[in-house]
Image: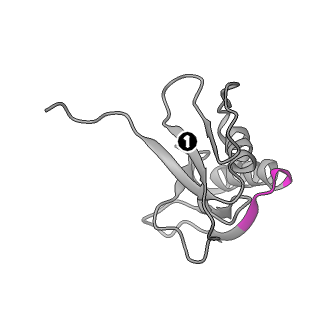
Amino acid sequence: MAPVRQFQVTFDCADPWRVARFWSEVLGYVLPPEQKDPAFASCTDPTGAGPRLFFQRVPEGKVVKNRVHLDVRVGTGLVGEERLAALEAECARLLPLGAVRGKLLLADGVNESCQLMQDIEGNEFCLD
């Protein structure tokens, strides 16, 4: 049996279209024009390199911390003040889209700095 090499990330949410538009802006993904069902939405990486994101309406709201989250890699290869500046610039770009800033985790000698964030429905993600 061949190993699975493609996957999608699925988000449970209250408003699939709103969350899909948010993540397409964050990641530079595109929304397929043929989507019609208000209970489902998706967005894809136009380069084909990243996974498809799928959003499905669920009746219950988010009540606890995510067990899985996305790391948006904006500071790869950067350290110190240069990395902090890249994290801050991306955070500033995402706040007007509805993102919420969380705690800034500073470099500790093992891990580099990262900015904790939440999307428009409270799902946690990191700027890394």
Residue on which disc 1 sits: 53
The verdict on residue 98 being magenta is: yes
Considering the image in quadrants, where does the N terminus appear? top left
Is residue 36 visible to the viewer in this orientation of the structure? yes
The residue at the point 50 percent across, 70 percent down is: 108
Q: Specify the segment rendered in magenta.
A: 96-101
Q: Quadrant of residue 33?
A: top right
Of 20 and 98, the residue lying toward us: 20
The residue at the point 68 percent across, 66 percent down is: 122
41 sits to left or right of 71? right
The verdict on residue 5 being magenta is: no
Instruction: Tell me which colouring the rendered structure shows.
Output: one colour
Q: Position of residue 23 (x, y in %)?
A: 67, 45
Q: Quadrant of residue 126?
A: bottom right
Q: Position of residue 53 (x, y in %)?
A: 55, 42
Q: Position of residue 85 (x, y in %)?
A: 72, 52
Q: Is residue 66 above or below residue 30?
A: below
77 sits to left or right of 90? left
Is residue 126 visible to the viewer in this orientation of the structure? no
Q: Position of residue 74 (x, y in %)?
A: 62, 45
103 sits to left or right of 68? right
Q: Secondary structure at mark 1?
A: strand
Query: How busy is the neighbourhood of tag 1: few (under 14 within 10 Å), some, or many (20 plus)?
Result: many
The residue at the point 56 percent across, 54 percent down is: 11
24 sits to left or right of 10? right
| Residue that protrudes farthest toward the right in the picture | 96
Q: Is residue 27 above or below residue 114?
A: above
Q: Quadrant of residue 40?
A: top right
| Residue that protrudes farthest toward the left in the picture | 1
